[in-house]
Amino acid sequence: MDIIASYGTVLLIMAIIFGLYMTWGIGANDLANAMGTSVGAGAVTLKQAIGIAIVFEFSGAVLAGGHVTSTIRKEIIDPSGIIGSPEILIYGMLASLLAAAFWLMVASWKGWPVSTTHSIIGALIGFAVVGIGPEAVKWGKVGSVVASWVVSPVIGGTISFLLVMSTRKLIFDTDNPLKYAKRYAPCYVFLVGFVISLVTLFKGLTHLKINLSVTQSFALAVGFGLLTAFIGWYFIRRIKEDRAADRGYHFASVEKVFAPMMLFTACAMAFAHGSNDVANGIGPLAAIVSIISSGGEVMQNSELPVWILLLGGGGIVLGLVTLGYRVMLTVGRKITELTPSRGFCAELAAATTVVIASRTGLPVSTTHILVGAVLGVGLARGIGALDLRVIFNIIVSWLVTLPAGAIMAMLFFFTLKGIFS
């Protein structure tokens, strides 16, 4: 308690800096891979992707980022053993933020799309083992995290594979692909609006004090889906056949139909990402602010001030602008060649998987889902369409994320404890 009274302001400033560093890492890695498919498919330019992210990522984080956030991320650790020493939890949260952020920076520089959720969970485990004791870690939850390494990409890949096959059957393998593309495009855009609004309605909006039943959520999602379908139809009907381009690539005109559709998925993915994943950076920060402001009381849940959401949204956008291009390049171009139709299927599959996971409690990672979805798109064209070397590097980075976060968190925890004790 004396340490909090003496160094409370210093610890708070450190928490804000580390929290900003962590959200910067989320933007450079997690958001970048969410936007990578749109950029890689050529549906949006890098500048447009950044513009979309600034508006929709920030909106998602602030409007639907959550009113109450669990200060112990994913209930991975039990802090009851250090109720009498709240400064230990502060050191641990600071160490976890710094460790996860540092790993995300390294991964982003290498162009590896890793899970920000797993980064912070690994860091929390490392702190808990040395700061509280191994018994403080809820190992059952850790097991579900490990399971997500397989579950996430398999579900995302399966759905994207089926979507690609549906576009092939309904559009590309017909006698008039452009005509059928225009016919079915609004249906696919409806799915985008429906699925993304369900993500938001199921997982967000507590911050706005809006609580809806499952039936109300579905009804609103259908309405939003119909609205996006109408907007999509309005833009798509204007697309004309480009015979000159078709001579170079038979489906060039058809791909032009999918380009505006990817604008919808890019905006929707950015909003959903902001509302769902901002907590990875601001959860530990909220815990520290709560402990310091309450004079040392350790609570499982804490109110989430709006300024923390603003900080989180700003940090994420900054990360995308400064270093996000490296991960975008890996997801958008290096795994497999993407066109607007393939990129659209990958993003819609990822969003659908997030909805399924949010309602069923499946242990999934947004990053792993999206990479799996891109793999599914590539597999629809055959194993030769995938760059297996890039895929191997990505899988290795996934396996390393948890222990890397844990080891660095241990080192930073002892350093911080040594400085302030």
Image (cartoon, rainbow, N blue to C red):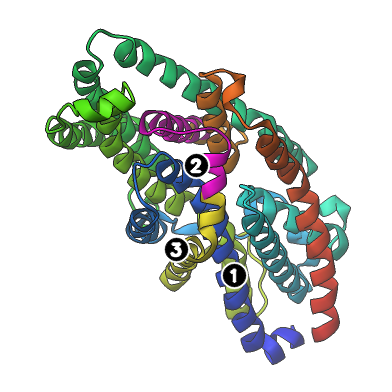
Q: Is residue 288 magenta?
A: no
Q: Which one is nearer the viewer's eye here, 74 or 268? A: 268
Identified at 53% across, 48% down, the residue is 329
Q: Which residue range is magenta in the image?
A: 329-357
Q: Tell us which disc is closer to us: 3 or 2.
A: 2
Above/below status of 145 relative to 273: above
User: Mark 1 = which residue?
Assistant: 21
Instruction: From the viewer's perspective, tell me whether residue 34 is left or right of residue 419.
Output: left
Q: Residues within 10 Å of mark 2 (few under 14, many from 20)?
A: many
Position of residue 321 measured from the top left corner of the image (x, y, whole percent):
46, 64
Identified at 56% across, 54% down, the residue is 326
Above/below status of 314 relative to 160: below
Q: Is residue 348 magenta?
A: yes
User: Mark 3 = which residue?
Assistant: 317
Q: Quadrant of residue 26?
A: bottom right
- CA–CA distance in space, label 3 to label 2: 19 Å
User: Mark 2 = which residue?
Assistant: 332
Above/below status of 295 relative to 385: below
Q: Main secondary structure of the magenta part?
A: helix
Position of residue 184 measured from the top left corner of the image (x, y, whole percent):
24, 20
Q: Amino acid at mark 3?
A: Val
Q: Answer yes or no: is residue 219 visible.
A: no
Instruction: From the viewer's perspective, tell me whether residue 373 is left or right of residue 234.
Output: right
